Amino acid sequence: MDLFSEEKTTFKLPNAELLYIPNFFDNTKADAYFSILKSEINWQQDNITVFGKTYKQPRLTALYANNDKPYSYSNITMHPKPFTEPLLDIKQAVQHKCNHEFSTVLLNFYRDGNDSNGWHADNEKELGKNPVIASVSFGEARPFHFKHRTLKNERYKIKLGHGSLLVMKGEMQHYWLHQIAKTKQQIGERINLTFRKII
């Protein structure tokens, strides 16, 4: 089911709560942030091992934080760099909207439709019991797919547009999986920032 909306929308779903704001940053600001992040972020491409085979992760990533706490997922451990001024500006705006403090941001750079992020949950123990995850997108719109682990009819997608904010909270990371799927369409670059608090 497509949950895309042009206006601020709060979704009450089984074991989850989502807030989606399509134009959290206007086009001018979103364009500027995309350009700054693409050129100034220290992007890396880690290896990922799936079923005993090692591949290049199908996107570029970076980790920034206000501390030196590492973040681990999929047998990858990332060590943060200090927040830059643009990242602090984005974080402050997101924190004000969410009424929640974030310590860390994981950035993903999707270069084209071949870059993706498979089904997963942000349920690492260092994020705490019911983490708040705030996701900001700049660049090409990509569908964000999510599905309930046990309720098979609970399956949705939201098209995350340029300058949008998606907030996941409540029990969502325990009961739901999400992904950014590959596409054969000719599409442009997308940068996604996922703010979280590492405890």
Image (cartoon, grey):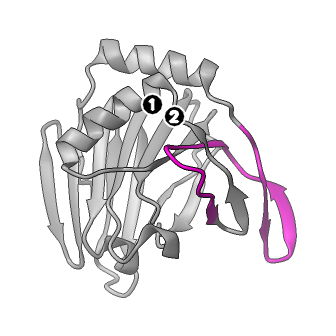
User: Does the rendering let one see residue 162?
Assistant: no
- Look at 14% across and 67% down and name the residue there: 12
**Residue interval drawn in magenta:** 44-72
| Amino acid type at image mark 1 | Leu
Query: Which mark lies nearer to you, 2 or 1?
Result: 2
| Amino acid type at image mark 2 | Phe
Q: Could you tell whether 162 is left or right of 12 in the image?
A: right
> Looking at the rendering, which quadrant does residue 75 occupy?
bottom right
* Place of residue 162 in the rendered image (x, y in percent of width and height, measured from the top left): 36, 29
- Look at 52% across and 27% down and name the residue there: 84
* Place of residue 35 in the rendered image (x, y in percent of width and height, measured from the top left): 52, 16
Asked if labels 1 and 2 touch by Cβ distance under 8 angstroms, the answer is yes
> Looking at the rendering, which quadrant does residue 77 occupy?
bottom right
Q: Nearer the viewer, residue 116 or 61?
A: 61
Category of crowding for the residue at label 1, using alpha-carbon neighbours closer than 10 angstroms: few (below 14), some (14–19), many (at least 20): some
Quarter of the image that includes the C terminus: bottom left
Separation (CA) of disc 2 from disc 1:
6 Å
Magenta stretch contains residue 95: no
Q: Nearer the viewer, residue 43 or 156?
A: 43
Magenta stretch contains residue 65: yes
Which residue was labeled with disc 1? Answer: 87
